[in-house]
Image (spheres, rainbow, N blue to C red):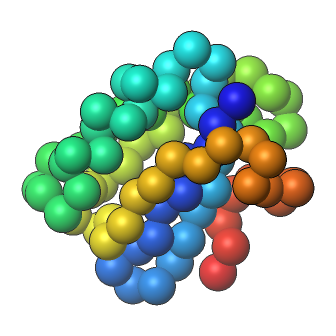
Amino acid sequence: MAYLMLVGTGGWSQRWEIAPGREETVRAELQQIGTSGTTRLPLLDPDTNTEVTFVVAWSAVAVGIITPSVAHAESPGQYA
């Protein structure tokens, strides 16, 4: 289990759990940070624990990292 952490160009941040078995797919898409492209990422809804499609406009993202589950306790979603 791993989490995707995105920090936006406007100072916002988001953390979402990556759908099981989809970490490499998400990792490959991080190469688009700062481009004009968009991507649909396979993440988990924190309330239902089911896979959802999360659309990212990479021009609005400044930083993206993948962290192991032990780095976070709870509260997926928007931080600020």
Q: Quadrant of residue 63?
A: bottom left
In the rendered structure, the answer to whether residue 47 lies left or right of residue 77 reads right
Question: What is the tally of numbered marks visible in this picture?
Answer: 0
Furthest toward the bottom, the residue is 11
Percent x, y of residue 30? 31, 46
Percent x, y of residue 43? 58, 32
- Quarter of the image containing the C terminus? bottom right
Question: Which residue: 46% across, 70% down?
Answer: 7
Question: Which residue: 79% across, 47% down?
Answer: 70
* Closer to us: 15 or 23: 23
Is 34 located above or below residue 44 in the figure? below
Percent x, y of residue 23? 50, 27
In the rendered structure, the answer to whether residue 76 lies left or right of residue 32 reads right
* Closer to us: 16 or 72: 72
Question: Which residue: 78% across, 56% down?
Answer: 72
In the rendered structure, the answer to whether residue 38 lies left or right of residue 48 reads left
Is 1 located above or below residue 21 in the figure? below
Furthest toward the top, the residue is 21
- Quarter of the image containing the N terminus? top right
Percent x, y of residue 4? 55, 48
